[in-house]
Image: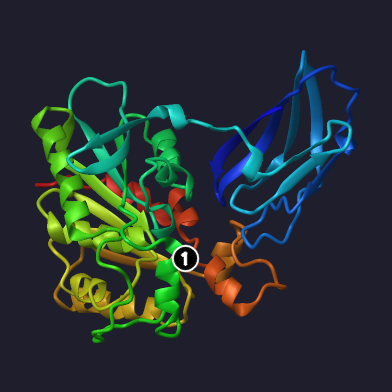
Amino acid sequence: MKITLHTAVLDFGQMVDEIRMEVDGTVPELKPEDFLCKDCYCNLSATQPIPGVKEVKVEGNVVSATTDPFLYRIDFSVSCEKLGVTVTKKNVDKIELYHEELFRPVVENGCRYRIYEPNCYGPRPLILFLHGGGASGEDNLQQLTDTLGPIKLAERCPDMYVMAPQAPAGSLSMEEMFAKMMSHGDPYKVLIGSDTDNAPEDRGWTRDALGRVCDVIRKMIAEGKVNPKRVYCIGGSMGGFGTIKAVSIAPELFAACAPICPSMNGESWPILANFPDVPAYISTAYIDHQVARHAYIMRAVQALWDKGRKDIRYTIFTPEELAQYGIGVNPDVSTKDLYAELHNSWIMVMHNEYCILDWMFSHEKK
């Protein structure tokens, strides 16, 4: 039996909404209640299960079971005794991603990236999207599926380039890196002023990786594809820090940027406190993994304001604002899981709350 999942990147990340099975032999009569859905969750904290399969269609030997969207990242199972099958991530043959075809895969200048190219004449604006830590790797795909981001931007801004590079995975896996961080205690503690290395130097948005990405953008400008006055950078979590770092590497390249829930550490904090002359709109939740991160961002931003930087903005999303997007609404999760859930504030920005996207796109380099 060949199994295909249809997925889409929605607010909570990659979600499954259809399972197609090519059956060998005769297909029995099937109803939605013949399918049992286990660990198919539709909320961020993975506590709310979907009701089950909504509809079953049979065309020849192909059975299609549609559901409410559920999280792909969880080890789910959908079983049907009549078909003698249990669908899990391990036995899926193909995953179809809605609007993946919009992004062409490229390997160039030592970096992997996906690029959405507008069907327009003349130089167009470019949005550089930097993913979070979980999408690092070599498959040139996870940067599209890890969180709401590149696909949403391409849908919203069809006349702009959207470039989504993938950071190198380096010598440590995500699990190994997190274990290293755990060895220092709280993996999300702020290490400003500390010489403790909390992450490998070859993983994520290194200066080398970002420099290579910036060189690709410069090449696109030289070729007349990209408007040199309208290059923007946006990212969340590790990508929020990556946004801060990218601007520090190539301040002449960017018209404006939007770092979302950026990591604060001994490297990112001093860069932000002495940020180059590039407009920035920083945003984060009132609690983001740990209770002090937004305060450290505030200290850096205040230092910029004290220098007269009127082009720096900072928004802290309140519990009520986050709850409107289903963030932090489950009273039964642990404090640790709640803090992790609040980290998903990029959802707010991708929906243009506080007009953050509009603000960024309004800027042109002089």
Amino acid residing under circle 1:
Glu
Residue drawn at point x = 56 percent, y = 70 percent: 319
Colour treatment of the image: rainbow
Q: In which quarter of the image is residue 190?
A: bottom left
Q: Name the residue under label 1.
A: 175
Q: Crowding near pointer 1: few (<14 within 10 Å), some, many (20+)? A: few
The quarter in which the N terminus is drawn is top right
Residue drawn at point x = 49 percent, y = 66 percent: 343
Residue 316 visible (yes or no): no
Q: Which residue lies furthest to the top in this view?
A: 60
Left or right, residue 100 beside residue 233: right
Q: Quadrant of residue 311?
A: bottom left
Is label 1 in a helix, a strand or a loop? helix
Left or right, residue 307 beside residue 78: left
Residue drawn at point x = 66 percent, y = 53 percent: 75
Left or right, residue 183 beside residue 32: left
Which x, y percent locates residue 174? 43, 62
Which x, y percent locates residue 317? 47, 67
Q: Is residue 93 above or below residue 234?
A: above
Q: In which quarter of the image is residue 216?
A: top left
Left or right, residue 111 beside residue 223: right
Q: Nearer the viewer, residue 255 or 84?
A: 84
Which x, y percent locates residue 257? 26, 54
Q: Is residue 227 above or below residue 246?
A: above
Q: Nearer the viewer, residue 209 or 328?
A: 209
Residue 290 visible (yes or no): yes
Which x, y percent locates residue 247? 18, 57
